[in-house]
Every structure is written in structure tokens, then in C-alpha cells.
């Protein structure tokens, strides 16, 4: 992550941008929902006057094009998906992350980066319990309001104990092969 030069390439300063990733079928395959999310991102950018960097999954880009959705805000950037190291570097230094990804919710908790989840539920409730994650749903004003709450809260939350586990791969292999 330290070797990534993504901040230089995108010309963004750490802690002065939002990072967005969205790919879930229930969010991007329904035009009204996807449109609402885009409106929410536009509102967030206008309120905070920071770039919104969207790592755009091919499925999401396809749906935006198919639905004829537009983003007139030139500070909301729809970019091709980033490689792992660049994405993690962006994630670690974001002002806030807006996502529908469960894994990203966990990573933000570990990195102490505020996270807003654009879903009505999460399979990572421990991130909500610790205070690192706020469930916004899909309504544009709710995305904006939850972002406001997320960025003003203390980031000194307790990282869930299970996130500190080591040797997870070995444990899974043992379970699968009957040795665990």
C-alpha cells in the first residue's frame, strides 16, 4: 500500500476525498435505486466540496449506461476498478467511504475510516455496533445525513476481537479437509 502512487495519479490529498464502491445487484440493477444513490453522492460532494472517487464495477457502469443516468457534477469521478493495492491505499486515506460491500465495511473498521453503507441491512453488524459503520439505505437525503454523522463521530472505536484472528487460511483448510 505504501508503494501505491494512486493519490499522485488522481491528484487527491489524503483525507480530502470520499471513496465509493457499489456493485450489489439490488442496488445497481434497479434504476430508481441506482439513481437515488447517484443523487446522494452528488449531494455529499456539494456539501463537503471534496472529490468523490467511485471505483466503478463493470456491472455498475453497464447499468448507468443502460439506464441513461448522468452525473453532471464534475467532482464525482466514475473510474475503472482499482487494483487491490491502489484501492486499499485510497481506502486507508479516505475522509469517508460509501459502499455496499461487506468486506469494505470490515476494512474501514480496521483502518479507522468512517463508513456509510448504502444498503438497508449488513452482514457485518459488528461494524455498526462498534460505531465505524452507519447503515444509510438508498434515499439521497439519508445518504447525506448518515455521511454527516459518520464524519463527525470519533474514530477511536473498538475493533471487533474476531478481526484480530490469525492463521484463518490454515483454519479453513483444516475444517474443509476434516482436520479441524
Image (tube, rainbow, N blue to C red):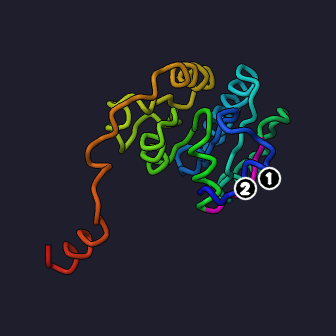
In the rendered structure, find residue 179 and report the number of the disc placed on it: none
Q: Which residue is drawn at 26% across and 48% down?
A: 162
Graded by Cα atoms within 10 Å as few (under 14), some (14 to 19) or many (20 or more), the crowding at tag 2 reads: some
**Relative to 24, is 15 above or below?**
above
Q: Which of 79 and 86 is in front in this view?
A: 86
Q: Residue 9 carries which label?
A: 1
State which quarter of the image contains the N terminus.
bottom right
Q: Which of 52 and 141 is in front in this view?
A: 52
* Residue 84 on image: x %, y %: 59, 61
Please tell me how crowded label 1 is: few (under 14), some (14-19), or many (20+) other residues with Cα within 10 Å: few
Horizontal side of 112 relative to 82 (left or right) equals: left
Image quadrant holding the C terminus, namely bottom left
Between residue 112 and residue 146, name the one nearer to us.
112
The x and y percentages for residue 16 are: 70, 32
**Residue corresponding to mark 2:** 5
Tell me if residue 20 comes above or below residue 79 in the rendering.
Answer: above
Q: Distance between the residues labelled 1 and 2?
A: 6 Å
Q: Is 120 placed above or below 124 here?
A: above
Q: How many discs mark residues in the rendered view?
A: 2
Q: Quadrant of residue 74?
A: top right
Could you say whether the residue bearing mark 1 is in a helix, strand or loop? helix
The residue located at (27%, 72%) in the rendering is: 170
Is 11 colored magenta in this rendering?
no
Residue displayed at 69% across by 45% down: 54
Q: What stretch is highlighted in magenta?
A: 77-83
Q: What element carries label 2?
A: loop
Q: Which residue is drawn at 66% across and 41% down?
A: 31
Would you say residue 81 sits in the magenta stretch? yes
* Tags 1 and 2 touching, CB below 8 Å: yes
- Which percent across, then down, holds residue 49? 76, 24
Q: Tell whether 117 sits left or right of 121.
A: right
Amino acid at each position: 500500500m505504501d508503494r501505491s502512487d494512486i493519490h499522485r495519479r488522481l491528484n487527491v490529498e489524503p483525507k480530502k476525498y470520499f471513496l465509493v464502491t457499489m456493485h450489489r445487484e439490488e442496488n445497481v440493477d434497479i434504476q430508481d435505486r441506482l439513481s437515488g444513490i447517484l443523487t446522494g453522492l452528488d449531494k455529499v460532494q456539494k456539501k463537503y466540496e471534496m472529490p468523490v472517487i467511485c471505483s466503478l464495477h463493470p456491472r455498475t457502469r453497464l447499468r448507468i449506461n443502460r439506464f441513461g443516468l448522468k452525473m453532471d457534477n464534475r467532482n464525482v469521478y466514475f473510474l475503472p476498478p482499482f487494483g487491490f493495492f491502489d484501492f486499499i491505499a485510497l481506502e486507508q486515506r479516505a475522509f469517508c467511504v460509501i459502499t455496499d460491500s461487506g468486506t469494505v465495511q470490515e476494512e474501514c473498521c480496521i483502518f479507522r475510516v468512517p463508513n456509510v453503507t448504502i444498503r438497508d441491512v449488513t452482514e457485518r453488524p459488528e461494524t455498526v455496533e462498534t460505531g465505524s459503520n452507519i447503515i444509510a439505505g438508498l434515499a439521497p437525503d439519508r445518504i447525506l445525513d448518515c455521511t454527516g454523522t459518520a464524519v463527525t463521530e470519533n474514530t477511536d472505536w473498538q475493533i471487533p476481537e474476531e478481526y484480530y484472528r490469525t492463521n484463518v487460511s490454515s483454519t479453513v483448510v483444516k475444517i474443509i479437509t476434516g482436520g479441524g
